Image (tube, rainbow, N blue to C red):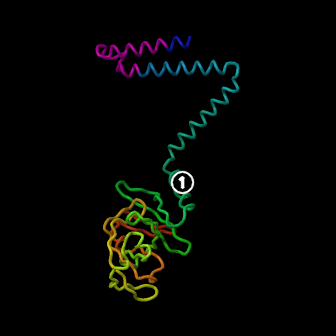
Amino acid sequence: MSAWIALILLVVAALALLLRGDAGSIAGVDPSDFAIFSAGLALMIFVGSSIVTSYRGRATQAARDFLTWVLIAFVLVAGYSYRDELLTFGHRITGELLPPGSSLRPDAQVDGERSVRIRKRADGHFIAKAAINGVTLVMLVDTGASTVVLKPADAQKLGVDVENLRYTVPVQTANGTTHAAHVRLRTLAVGSIVLNEVEALVAKPGALKENLLGMSFLSRLRSYEFSGEYLTLRI
């Protein structure tokens, strides 16, 4: 019987579409909306009758399955409602599991803003995994360095001919004053933040233990903020 009711509703829906140009409205409802409603109701009746038939004589199983689907629907709706909080929680967990220097998504994002967050290293310093001219290098964030400074070995990875550089720029390091050579980096990216044509220096061999992410990069950002265990860069 239910199958016939569903079939009649489908026929009514089809007629509503065929007569759409002439009928104007059906019971005050647009024919296309009436057709969609009728087709949906027919589908619900057909599927519902099939389910009832399959559970005939198994009321307990039907109730158990119904409650299971209600619980699943509740979890999905709740998850969607609290999606922002869940994403924030997930990013915090990820931040603890990933090694220091990995670029993380900040908890709050502003429209039109690109930002990344970096977790502090065990020794209290912030390091960033940067992509320079497409080559990944680990860099120490140093607001006291006026420019980005690279070790010669890492500069060679970028295709810089370190043997023919002129080391004429005086640089103050923890070991005293040394000299470096001026270069220009085509691109320097930290996570989603990408800057072009970044001024940099290549230090003399043995003068530098770590690459420095200095102010020639940081000063071109919209802002950078140190907060507890994290450094947030924004552009």
Quarter of the image that includes the C terminus: bottom left
Membership of 24 in magenta stretch: yes
Q: Is residue 88 magenta?
A: no
Left or right, 209 with respect to 60, comes to left
Q: Residue at x 52, y 11 (%)?
A: 4
The residue lying furthest to the bottom in this view is 176
Span colored in magenta: 7-35
- Amino acid found under the numbered disc labelled 1: Gly
Kindly tell me whether residue 10 is visible in this rendering: yes
Looking at the image, which residue is at 52% across and 56% down? 91
Query: Which image quadrant for residue 148?
Result: bottom left
The residue that disc 1 covers is 90
As drawn, 223 above or below 65: below
Q: Is residue 188 above or below residue 22?
A: below
Query: SS for tag 1?
Result: helix
Q: Is residue 232 visible?
A: no
Considering the image in quadrants, where does the N terminus appear?
top right
At which x and y percent is residue 216? 34, 73
Picture coordinates of residue 131, whole percent (x, y): 41, 64
- 218 and 129: which one is in front? 129
Q: Residues within 10 Å of mark 1 (few under 14, many from 20)?
A: few
Percent x, y of residue 195: 34, 64
Q: Could you tell me which residue is drawn at 61 percent across and 36 percent down?
A: 71
Residue lying at the far left of the rendered structure: 22
Location of residue 3 in the rendering, given as x and y in whole percent from the top left corner: 54, 13
User: Toward the viewer: 182 or 78?
Assistant: 182
Residue 112 vertical placement versus 180 (above, below) = above
Compared with 48, 85 (above or below) is below
Where, by quadrant of the figure, is residue 89 drawn? bottom right
